[in-house]
Amino acid sequence: MKRIIFTLAIISLIICSCNKEDNTPKNQWTIFNSGDGILNSAAHSVTCDKDGKIYIGQTGGITTYENGNFHLEEFENQIIADIFQDNTGKIWAGVKNNKLMRLENNQWIIPNEDISNIINISQGTNNSIWVCTAGKDFYNFNGSIWEKYRIPNNLTLNDGFVKFSVVDHKGLLWIGGWDGLYSFDGSNWEFYDINPELWSEYMECVLITEKGDVYAAAYYEGLKKYEEGAWIDFLELPHEWVKSLYQSTNGDIWIGFAYEGVARYDGTNLIHYDDENLKEYPISDICQDKDGNMWFVQNYGDIGRVTRFSNWQ
């Protein structure tokens, strides 16, 4: 009889232990709409700084999130297309219909009155930054001197809309937009034909990984990887329209889709998160905060939301 009771007690402990483990929260999604603290539903960009603060670029201003609290800073009628922290810790904001801004002593200043219509800001070499505009002009800032560049007239990108820029490990500046993908080494341009059969190559994004691998996504063309001078299909995706790419600190690649949620590739497996809330709007920007949480901006014009993904590892 004692043996039976002892056995039942052990089984009970095992069951309790299993139940406790099963109750550990996993894959927690938190949605932030305009009524939850952010400025409004028109979110365009997000960055997570090194101190744990989240910056959300929106139409009409910037929302910051820190220690569970939101702070709103309004810039009437201005579209904050990109928020970026450089290697020195400075926070930059690119205003699509106005000037470039930089945060100094908790105040947003305009460091260069000549730069306007900003689309994207990216890290360059030697702590410099690149500022890409919607027109033909783009700029490099080395900490003290601004240098202006202009896209040559003989490039088809000249007639299109520039969407992004990013710098690889070799110092090449990659620029993409409505009419394709190009690299610039400071003197020379090179065009990359993602798919020769396409009438127009609308580029969505490029990711440069920690290893230096280059991934690119064009409109409804899935995900490509650049290897030995050629673009190859990479991964069989649940959806071909990729809007954003990001690499988290553990090396996983995050793939934001248009209306099909987000996927995570861990080097072996592709995990697709397709909750209905994630599928309502395209995922246009991704970042990871210092606690490991993933942040996603979902945007369609002036509607969208911000979503945080916790306990995913």
Image: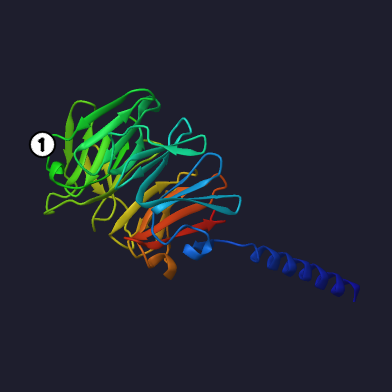
Residue under the image location 42 percent in, 62 percent down: 41
Q: Where is residue 104 in the image (x, y as percent from the top left)?
A: 48, 34
Residue carrying label 1: 153
Quarter of the image holding residue 185? Answer: top left
Residue under the image location 53 percent in, 63 percent down: 36
Quarter of the image holding residue 156? Answer: top left
| Left or right position of 202 against 1 | left
Q: Position of residue 154 (x, y in %)?
A: 9, 37
Q: What residue type is labelled 1?
A: Asn
Whether residue 280 is visible here, answered yes or no, is yes
The scheme the figure's colours follow is rainbow
Q: Position of residue 34 (x, y in %)?
A: 47, 63
Whether residue 57 is visible here, answered yes or no, is no
Residue under the image location 34 percent in, 65 percent down: 259
**Which of the pair 18/31 is nearer the observer?**
31
Q: Find the residue positioned furthest to the bottom.
A: 1
Q: Position of residue 130 (x, y in %)?
A: 32, 34
Residue under the image location 50 percent in, 61 percent down: 32
Residue 6 lies, with reference to residue 202, above or below; the image says below
On-image quarter of the N terminus = bottom right
Q: Find the residue positioned furthest to the right.
A: 2
**Which of the pair 99/158 is nearer the observer?**
99
Give the SS element for disc 1. loop
| Left or right position of 149 against 131 | left
Residue 217 lies, with reference to residue 133, above or below; the image says below
| Left or right position of 190 against 255 | left
